Amino acid sequence: MLRALPSKIVYNTLVIKLDDGTTISIPRRELWDVRVQLMAEEDDEGLGNLGKDDVKTGVYEGGFKSWESSVDVVKVLHGRKGKGDASFSRKVLELGCGTALPSLAVLQWLLEDPNSTGALYLGLADYNPTVLQLVTLPNILLSWAQVTRKNSWEAEGELDLDEEVIKEFRASLESHHVRLSFFSGAWSPEFVGLVKEDMSSHASRLTIIGAETIYSPAALKSFAETLMSLLENMPDDDRISLVAAKKVYFGVGGSMEDFCEMVRLHSAAVDQIREESDGVRRAVVEVKMPSK
């Protein structure tokens, strides 16, 4: 994937105000820069996914856009990190990651902490491989560059990606014991098997994250079944997930209440841990499986 990156990435920065009054700045690749790359590569399918539609079922699942619920998850993760909560994991799987704001936040916190020890595993899954290649991976590089180039970093600009930068990036991840895995494709038993195989060699608690993944009845059912399959096959201490979404998706049929009802049918415990009423009502729930 690194070999397929362009020679430079144009970016802006999203500043998230956290609950304790501090902020986190997360750089993201500009969508117009993605469009320029797709035009140069004559990728008509990719260009079509950058149109007006947020989602095209079975074709494009909204990965180029940063969703509000992703910001909500960042705030939850920061709160747990600050409290030293044992459920703040160093092994994260983000389903439907897209721009991957929660994973980027976790990565930045690790890189910024001089006392950080132990490995970090980030699994990033999106329906579209083009999203992983054009947005997710570039954003990871941007987060890394922002931390390692603090003295010269600007909120908007370009990051040159020559061989030396890529070499430095890989060496930095290795020295910080960071491992990245990318998964593309529909949620399915095959997807679950692939993820389980990849994660099985990584000790420590896993937190599964999903933001804006239940926007329609079909998506809700598929996501819930995949999530439950992953949780049901984990060791007892690892069975935790954070799911963030709008309370109701008007016009398309998905809702947080329907999701909670579905996972409870699998004997999961669901607790609402955050609610946002600014704009469209949103919530973050924690899903836990009982001990076997």
Image: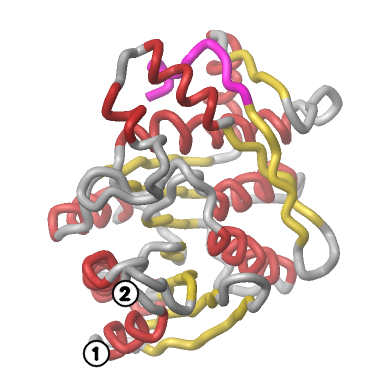
Residue that mark 2 sits on: 253
- Vertical relation: 128 (above or below) 142: below
Whether residue 70 appears in this view of the structure is yes
Q: Is residue 185 magenta?
A: no
Q: Residues within 10 Å of mark 2 (few under 14, many from 20)?
A: some
Question: Residue 5 occupies which quadrant of the picture?
Answer: top left
Tell me the residue at 83%/59% (across/down).
Answer: 22
Q: Position of residue 289 (x, y in %)?
A: 35, 83
Q: Is residue 81 left or right of residue 175?
A: right
Image coloring type: secondary structure
At label 2, which amino acid type do we have?
Gly
CB contact under 8 Å: marks 1 and 2: no
At label 1, which amino acid type do we have?
Leu
| Element carrying mark 1 | loop
In which quadrant of the rendered image does the N terminus lie?
top left
- Vertical relation: 20 (above or below) 269: above
| Element carrying mark 2 | loop
Q: Magenta residues?
A: 1-10
Q: Position of residue 35 (x, y in %)?
A: 46, 24
Tell me the residue at 27%/29% (across/down).
Answer: 45
Residue that mark 1 sits on: 265
Q: Nearer the viewer, mark 1 or mark 2?
A: 2
Q: Is residue 65 left or right of residue 53?
A: right
Q: Position of residue 32 (x, y in %)?
A: 54, 26
238 or 93: nearer the eye? 93
C-alpha gap between disc 1 and disc 2: 19 Å
Decide which of tag 1 and tag 2 comes sooner along the chain.
2
Whether residue 206 appears in this view of the structure is no
In which quadrant of the rendered image does the C terminus lie?
bottom left
Residue at the extreme left of the image, as rendered: 190
